[in-house]
Image (tube, rainbow, N blue to C red):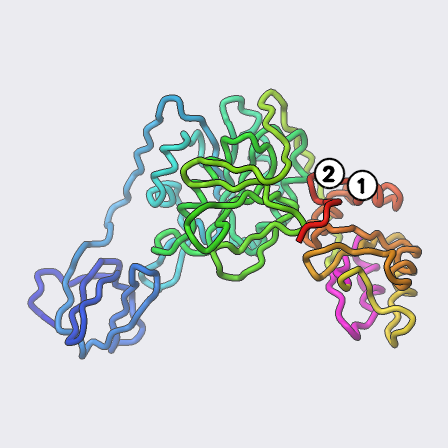
Amino acid sequence: MNKNEEKNPGIGDKVKIITPDEEIEGTLIASSEPSLVIIKLKSGYNIGIKKENIINMKLIEEAETREEKLKIEEKKNLPYIDIIVTGGTISSKVDYKTGGVSWITKPEELFKFYPEIFNIVNVNEIKIPFMKASENIDYEDWKQIAQEVEKSLNNKNIKGVIITHGTDFLHYTSSALSFFLKNLNKPVVLTYAQRSSDRGSSDAKMNLLCSAHAAISDIAEVIVVGHASINDDFCYAHRGTKVRKLHSSRRDAFKSVNDKPIAKIFPSGKIEIMNKYKKREDSKKVKLDANFNRNIFLLKYFPSQSPDIIDYLSKKYDGLIIEGSGLGHVASKESRENWIPYLRKAINNGMIICMTSQTIYGKVDQYVYSPAREIEKIGVIYLKDMLAETAFVKLGYVLSKTKNYEEVKEMMLQDIAGELNNRREN
């Protein structure tokens, strides 16, 4: 390596590395291996280069050494929205000391990557109630988000709200907000990123731009907005109770299930409506109804599973969602592990048990085969095409109001927030 460089590059600096075979540009990252220099390429991938092969390493640009303040100038005639930041990949950045990612802790850090959003809307307030990966978000956090949304939507100057969130359990939060926010009058948009903000392949920029357009649209529902495909062409707006993450890493990870997306939303602002939706009514006042009974359980049935799990769960929980077979079966009298006596006992002791399908697409149907008819006869509530995760959240919401079987059954089978769809989709 050239020892005569005026200034040796440091961690986080952009550099050009010259080897006998090629020139490579990237950002310098700390290396735990003394013989290697690690850089992050523009694509987001890290590569290691043996020091013995480096002819020269030139400093291109120093890392930022002072905090930059984002100057946001209000623009006349642009509508106002609020943004609620809760964590997840969309709120992360590369930590060059480790090569991994760390939380963005100030709004300025996030929005310096996406200044284009301020050509669409004025941001009235950026709220950060907490910063958590989505697996750490619980029902108390759902309530806190809902409280912040209620305050924003009841401000007559605010046209809508964007919530940035981690991907893995985002659909639980979107379901919770769908039930917690009554008389919804304006758009509530949850969005995400599969790849961190400072990666060249990040999906965050387009997701946020489309979300800004969605937040000032006439779609007065809780929606999840994100890439419709792996390309940067347009986003889908998915109904909050009918969406699920169906891929671990693709940019179009979220899909509408047993329903069509509400709309295509383009970064340009063009919106193509695809499905029915509740329209904006700015004069309405949103009401918060965020009570939740946490004593519920989501159980996935599998062949040969012992039914004594039902005995155990019924002593600890008020309600149970079962992911049964495609049409909603569990082992019956033809099996060595007959579940029906255990289910009957639990229901007779006051437990509410509901059936969903583990096939994701389609619906449970208790009228096709006799075992399911028997399961329904003992009191298991069949939830049609409702997603299991949505059913879990809804049951906690309903059981916070009543534990009476008939009342619970009526509410679980009532379409409150678009969670039940009588049309058969793909």
Q: Does the image show residue 65?
A: yes
Q: Which residues are magenta?
A: 299-324
Q: Residue at x 93, y 55 (%)?
A: 377
In the rendered image, the vertical position of residue 324 relative to residue 254, given as above or below: below
Nearer-the-camera pick, 54 or 100: 54
Q: Is residue 69 left or right of residue 134?
A: left
User: Contact, CB < 8 Å: mark 1 with mark 2?
Assistant: yes
Q: Residues within 10 Å of mark 2 (few under 14, many from 20)?
A: some
- Residue 212 part of the magenta segment: no
Task: Look at the image and say whether residue 316 sits in the magenta stretch.
Answer: yes
The foreground one among 131 and 188 is 188
Q: Label 1: few (<14), some or many (≥20) within 10 Å?
A: some
Could you tell whether 319 is left or right of 165 in the image?
right
The amino acid pointed to by label 2 is: Ile
In this picture, residue 376 sits left or right of residue 251: right
Q: Which residue is mark 1?
A: 411
Q: Is residue 140 visible?
A: no
- Of marks 1 and 2, which one's residue comes earlier in the chain? 1
**Rendered residue at 22%/58% (across/down):** 14
Return the residue at label 2.
Answer: 416
Q: Which residue lies at the image location 50% right of the left edge and 34% below the top edge?
A: 215
Q: Residue furthest left?
A: 4
Q: Amino acid at mark 1?
A: Met
Residue in the picture at 26% in, 58% down: 12
